[in-house]
Amino acid sequence: MNPVIETILTRRAVRKYEKQPVPRELLEQIVDCGRYAPSAMGLQTWHFTVVTDRKVLDRISEANAKLVASDPNVPATLKEEAASGRFDSFRGAPCAVLMSGEPGRKFADVDCANAVENMALAAESLGLNTCYIASFVPCLLGEQGAQLRRELGIPEGYTPNLALAIGYGADAPTPAPRREGCVNWVE
Ligand SMILES: Cc1cc2nc3c(=O)[nH]c(=O)nc-3n(C[C@H](O)[C@H](O)[C@H](O)COP(=O)(O)O)c2cc1C
C-alpha cells in the first residue's frame, strides 16, 4: 500500500506510553512537518511549544486535576480520576507539542489542528505513537493560566488550544474498525 495512505489508515490515538524519551532530531522533524501544514491564507497563525520535561507536563496535569475536582459539571468518573492522583492530561507520554493560536485570527484553531494532524502522521511514520489532546487547555486559560503560559514561553496573547502527546506506545494499538458512511457524492 502507498505508505502515506497506510500511515493515515493505521494511526490510532495511544494512551499508554513507554518512559523512553523521543530523540530530539525526531521531534525537530515532527515539528517541521507541523510548520508545513496548510493554514488559512498561508498566515500560519500558530505557535509550537515542545515540552520534553515530563515534570512540566505533570504540573499542567495537576493544575487541570484541581479544576476538574472543583467543577460541578464534570462526570463522577473523571472526578475520581482527578482525586486519585493518576490524572494525566498527556496520557503518560514523555513529551508533547502544545499549540497556541495567534490572537484575533478567525482560523487559528483550524490552522493549529492542521499542524497537529501533520505532526501526528509524521510521528507515526517515524515509528512513534501519538494522542491528540484538547483537555490540557483549561488550566492555561485566562488570568489563572497566565503564570504557566509565561513559564512555557507561549507568546503574549496567544491561546493554547490543542496538543499532540508523542512517545513510544506501550502496547500496539488495535486497528480502527472499518469506517463507512457520512459521504454523499454529487455526480
Ligand atoms: C480535537 C480533538 C481533541 C481531542 N482531545 C483528546 C483528549 O483531550 N484526550 C484524549 O485522550 N484524546 C483526545 N482526542 C483523541 C480522540 O479521542 C481520538 O482521536 C478519537 O477517539 C478517535 O480515535 P483514533 O484517533 O484512534 O482514530 C482528541 C481528538 C481531537 C480531534
Image (tube, rainbow, N blue to C red):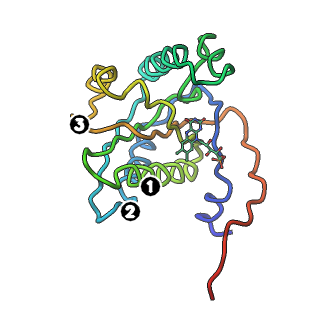
On the image, numbered disc 1 is attached to which residue?
A: 114
Q: Nearer the viewer, residue 167 or 164?
A: 164
Binning the other alpha carbons within 10 Å of mark 2 as few (below 14), some (14 to 19) or many (20 upward) gives: some
Q: Quadrant of residue 170?
A: top right
Which residue, as the protein is rendered here, is positioned at the far left? 156
- Viewed as shown, does residue 1 lie left or right of 67? right
Binning the other alpha carbons within 10 Å of mark 3 as few (below 14), some (14 to 19) or many (20 upward) gives: some
**Three-letter amino acid code at the position of disc 1:** Asn
Measure the C-alpha gap from mark 3 to mark 2: 22 Å
Q: Are marks 1 and 2 in contact (CB under 8 Å)?
A: yes
Binning the other alpha carbons within 10 Å of mark 1 as few (below 14), some (14 to 19) or many (20 upward) gives: some
Q: Which label lies toward us, 3 or 2?
A: 3
Measure the C-alpha gap from mark 1 to mark 3: 21 Å
Say which quadrant the C terminus sits in. bottom right
Residue 151 % position (x, y): 28, 22
**Three-letter amino acid code at the position of disc 3:** Gly
On the image, numbered disc 2 is attached to which residue?
A: 38
On the image, numbered disc 3 is attached to which residue?
A: 157
| Mark toward the start of the polypeptide (3 vs 2) | 2
